[in-house]
Amino acid sequence: MKLRKVSDADASELLQVVTESLEHLKPWMSWATNDYDAATAAGFLANSAKGWADGRLFNHAITVDGAIVGVAGADRAGDVVEIGYWLHPAHTGRGLATAAAAELVEFAFALALDGVRRVQIWHDEANIASGGVPRRLGFSEIDRRTPPREPAFGNEAGVDVVWELKR
């Protein structure tokens, strides 16, 4: 497994991986809808490029043997970086999300010179698989919140579990 910065050159491969993963992602990701198309993928990649340039959003392709199998991102807000991840269903259960998150933890703490002191992972409490990642990486559960931003959808319980790691 390798992480690399996403780029415009990833548009068609990303679209294919997302399209193949939609049924797996729909219960957990609000952006995973049947109308995900080339324009949506291009918008994601443009936002990613802007985020890298602004030093606030660092989306990475998760790759295996050079092929994209998912995406992991680090979203910075002040002294905290929130990590998120998703995988194509053919690549779950192999430790790839944990490995990607571990690499992003190191990436996030490398931003410490710019004030980063905490890394968080948020997931819906019903998403047991996503909760295993921070647990395996030594994060501590610090809160459970009912998010005001959007109602629960898919398989979500509507309660975010917040995990944190400090250095």
Image (spheres, rainbow, N blue to C red):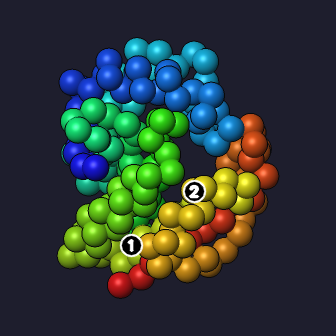
Front in this rendered view, residue 68 or 147: 68
Identity of the amino acid at label 1?
A: Asp
**Residue pictured at 60% horizontal, 56% vertical:** 129
Q: Which of marks 2 and 1 is in front?
A: 2
**Residue pictured at 75% horizontal, 42% vertical:** 155
Q: Estimate how packed mark 1 is, as few (under 14), some (14 to 19) or many (20 or more) residues with alpha carbons within 10 Å.
A: few
- Residue 117 on image: x %, y %: 36, 78
Q: In this view, does 152 lie to the left or right of 69?
A: right
- Residue 144 on image: x %, y %: 71, 69
Residue position for label 2: 130
**Residue pictured at 56% horizontal, 64% vertical:** 132
Label 2 with label 1: CB-CB less than 8 Å = no
Front in this rendered view, residue 1 or 144: 1
**Rounded to the nearest whole Å, what is the CA distance between mark 2 and mark 1?**
23 Å
Describe the element under mark 1 as helix, strand or loop. Answer: loop
Q: In this view, does 165 lie to the left or right of 104?
A: right
Residue position for label 1: 79
- Residue 93 on image: x %, y %: 51, 51
Instruction: Please identify the quarter of the rendering in which residue 77 is found.
Output: bottom left
Identity of the amino acid at label 2?
A: Ser
Describe the element under mark 2 as helix, strand or loop. Answer: helix
- Residue 48 on image: x %, y %: 32, 39
Q: Is residue 51 left or right of residue 131?
A: left
